[in-house]
Amino acid sequence: MHYLVLGAGPAGVTAAETLRKHDKTAKITLLGGEPEPPYSRMAIPYYLIEKVGEDGTYLRQQENHYQDHGIDYVHGTAAALQGKAKRIKLTDGSEIQFDKLLICTGASPITPPVPGLDRDGVYNCWTLEDARHIARLAQKGEPVVLMGAGFIGSIILESLALKGVNLTVVEMGDRMVPRMLDETAGVMLQQWCENKGVRVMTKTMISEVTDGPEGLTVHTKDGDKLDAKLLVVAAGVQPNIGFLASSGVEIEHGILVDHYMRTSVPDVYAAGDVCQATDFSTQKAEMLAIQPVAVEHGRIAAQNMAGKVTPHEGSLNMNVLESMGLITASFGLWMGVEGGDSAKMVDLENNRYLRLEFDGNKLVGGQAVGLTEHVGILRGLIQTELDLGPWKDKLLKSPERLPEAYIAVSHGII
Amino acid sequence: MQLALVIDPGKCTSCKQCEMACAYEKEQTFNPAKSRIRIFDFHEEARFVPYTCTQCDEAWCQQACPVNAITTDHASGVKIVHDNLCVGCKVCTIACPFGTINYNADTGKVIKCDLCGGDPACAKACPTDAITYSDVEQSGFEKMKAWAAKTDAAAQS
Ligand SMILES: Cc1cc2nc3c(=O)[nH]c(=O)nc-3n(C[C@H](O)[C@H](O)[C@H](O)COP(=O)(O)OP(=O)(O)OC[C@H]3O[C@@H](n4cnc5c(N)ncnc54)[C@H](O)[C@@H]3O)c2cc1C
Ligand code: SF4
Ligand code: SF4
């Protein structure tokens, strides 16, 4: 048996290890498209602020980890999948034959159709290679513009701000992180960032990038001109599926998989940012594109590949973000459901906010700003679908009693 | 033999000795807010529940960590955060369904119960044996572990 795992991010690495756990003798190849040892994109912001070195971003820290687990980690870029022949063609012309394939090639940043984004000084913040360029240019006091204040944009914002650059962020939407935070939380976050000296421009777009006195001039559609040494583009991502053209693998936004993480081509599975799999909350195929979900997918796909039948019941969407000391988190259906109940605790003065969303007696979503103690309980309550009984009414009055509610209900104190 | 914290809420009187002992052991302060174990008071029902990490088998915190900063000690089953590797991303804090791994803004890292390297201060401090360190397969904690299993997106191996 030869398992080929395509992509050496968190999904791929977890999958290769899980395959080994369940199949002691098979040949396992992990193919990575970047020159470094398998690393975590998520750790890049901490590399930028020098909290860790490059090696601190590596997914596994033990020396010879892959060798010790009998995993062949090789470099190369897939160019085409020939599903019937069970073969991957690489860009260098070589081929790899497999018995079972897992595609976890992740996603790549989108470059919006804005003139001038091909200039020197314009970078994404997606790979370690990108990060090295940004680290070089984002020096203290230098003018820097960030395009996009979505989840990833806002994470990068934090590192750039901590590096002490003179930062302006330009966001198309009406608030920061519109897909993770509601208006109350988004506005709180924006005011917080502005108080910390970051200029936040919403409801506007970058229309062009030209030469400027600092290197670049960034033009907005409203006529603002921002001089910058560096422009970081965080305008969304798209799955890496180019090599699947005419492979027969069914794709909607990402690779479609069934409950066992199988694609439409026999013996070909998919996991992580590249695939569109069941969301716990909606039970629909969604692109969640977060680290814990990539790991979950990788593990479940590998178990199924190794013959340990494991249905995927759905992964929970959840995010946590720190912005210069203000921590925000969101879980599941934080925007609520029709006919459901909602509880809010808003404390603008102290930058604290908690919103809970219920469907009947169950918690289905939530958001927290400035509250970190026991925050994981939101996940616990949502995913165990615990019936809150009389505690629901208590929570409607005082949402901050959530940890008590969880402990009471799970210990039968009702 | 694998020892574990065995918690019997029925014996807890909410004296908070465990919180003080933990805060002192870990942070050299008698401030219960710094404790990794917490007593939840349900005064109306006269019930008190000591609450901390169960060292659960699934170890969501460990699975979610992007840089391998949480590992399992195979002899004791304890999940340990390595401060030198932790980048402070907080993903573990949203992944643990009990909320028993928490961010410490002072250090920029996360904290959780590590059983004090095999001699937990809370158990020593508890005057009523509501918290003991033993190998008893005890129902309360086992039940909590069973709760944890329900969080999974799939059956665990
Ligand atoms: C700056 C930044 C911060 C982030 N912060 C968070 C966060 O706080 N929380 C969170 O949950 N998520 C965060 N994310 C998202 C998270 O990193 C991703 O969800 C996660 O990396 C997805 O894992 P994956 O294994 O699916 O894909 P990836 O990690 O993208 O790995 C894909 C792998 O496939 C390889 N590859 C691609 N194409 C090919 C090809 N044709 N041939 C061979 N190999 C190929 C790549 O080189 C790479 O090794 C962040 C991402 C970034 C960039
Ligand atoms: S912190 Fe949470 S997820 Fe981690 S071992 Fe403890 S209970 Fe399990
Ligand atoms: S906060 Fe630290 S221990 Fe937790 S997931 Fe991030 S790096 Fe790992």
Image (cartoon, coloured by chain):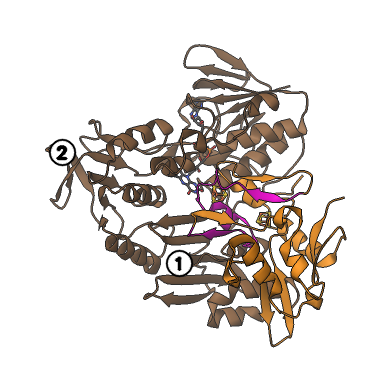
Q: Quadrant of residue A192?
A: bottom left
Q: Are marks 1 and 2 in contact (CB under 8 Å)?
A: no
Pick the quarter of the image with the N terminus of chain A: top right
What range is drawn magenta here?
B77-106
x%, y% of residue A208?
18, 40
Residue neighbourhood size for the residue with mark 1, other residues' Cα within 10 Å, grouped as few (<14), some (14–19), many (≥20): some
**Mark 1 or 2, nearer chain start:** 2
Residue drawn at x 38%, y 36% as measured from the top left: A131
The residue lying toward the viewer, choosing from A121 and B5, is B5
Secondary structure beneath dot 2 equals: loop
On whether residue B90 falls in the magenta region, the answer is: yes
The residue lying toward the viewer, choosing from B72 and B107, is B107
Numbered circle sitting on residue A370: 1
* Residue B44 showing in the rendered view: yes
The chain that appears brown in the image is A
Relative to B157, is A215 on the left or the right? left
x%, y% of residue A59?
56, 36
The chain that appears orange in the image is B
Cα–Cα span, label 1 and label 2: 37 Å
On whether residue B136 falls in the magenta region, the answer is: no
The three-letter code of the residue at mark 1 reads Gly
Outermost residue toward the top in this view: A93
Residue tagged 2 = A214
